[in-house]
Amino acid sequence: VLIAIGRDACTRNIGLQTIGVKINEKNGKVPVNDEEQTNVPYVYAIGDILDGKLELTPVAIQAGRLLAQRLYGGSSRKCDYINVPTTVFTPLEYGCCGYPEERAVDEFGKQNLEVYHTLFWPLEWTVPGRDNNTCYAKIICNKQDNNRVIGLHVLGPNAGEVTQGFAAAIKCGLTKELLDETIGIHPTCAEVFTTMDITKSSGQDITQKGC
């Protein structure tokens, strides 16, 4: 078993203090504003070095591309650090995009959220008789914004592929109503997001009887 925890930010010996760029003394990372600008206006930082941002290569590439366009191409587009699809490639994959439930509560207030969730059983698990109700799906909706989906989470086979597809819809302003109106492909794991009807607040049973 290999456990890899965190990355070191090697910022203490590259002269940042000479020009006055501030770092987080706890982890060496660099705080920036929403345009990747440090406290020194002409110094920018992108990628894993950013304090409080995601350590993902595609995020760094996107942020760098948009920064170059703002600096030299007259663009005003900023990197979206919230609606970033990502996956943990464990034997049972976990994928997510948008807010985790806890952060959504802090940001919007529990009373303004509706969380839909369900357990599900992939078709390919029925023949080998793998445990039912091991896979899980959840969406977090902002009731104050037309039930817009602000968080999507899935634990199951091919979660990365599922999440990547829904990420584009979330960027386009996906709502619970639009999900309900979407015809699912049966029998797929992604279909579960088109049939959710149990809210977490209801306390109802979310177990499934079959695929």
Image: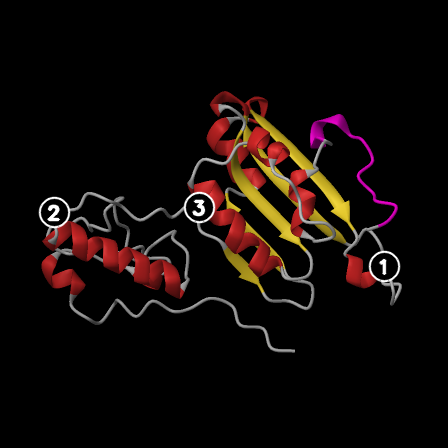
Residue at 80% across, 31% down: 204
The residue indicated by pointer 2 is 74
**Which of the two discs, 2 and 3, labels the residue nearer the N terminus?**
2
The residue indicated by pointer 3 is 83
Quarter of the picture containing the N terminus is bottom right
| Amino acid type for the residue under numbered disc 3 | Asn
Residue 147 coordinates in the image, percent (x, y): 54, 27
- Assess whether mark 1 and mark 3 are in contact (beta carbons under 8 angstroms): no
Question: Looking at the image, which residue sits at the far bottom?
Answer: 1
From the viewer's perspective, is residue 202 above or below residue 119?
above
Nearest to the observer: residue 18 or residue 198: 198
Which structural element holds mark 1? loop
Residue at 65% across, 39% down: 194
Residue 24 coordinates in the image, percent (x, y): 31, 55
Say left or right for 48 vs 13: right
Figure coloring: secondary structure
From the viewer's perspective, is residue 159 above or below residue 8?
above
| Amino acid type for the residue under numbered disc 1 | Asp
- Assess whether mark 3 and mark 2 are in contact (beta carbons under 8 angstroms): no
Q: CA distance from mark 1 to mark 2?
A: 54 Å
Residue 73, which numbered label? Answer: none
Which structural element holds mark 3? loop
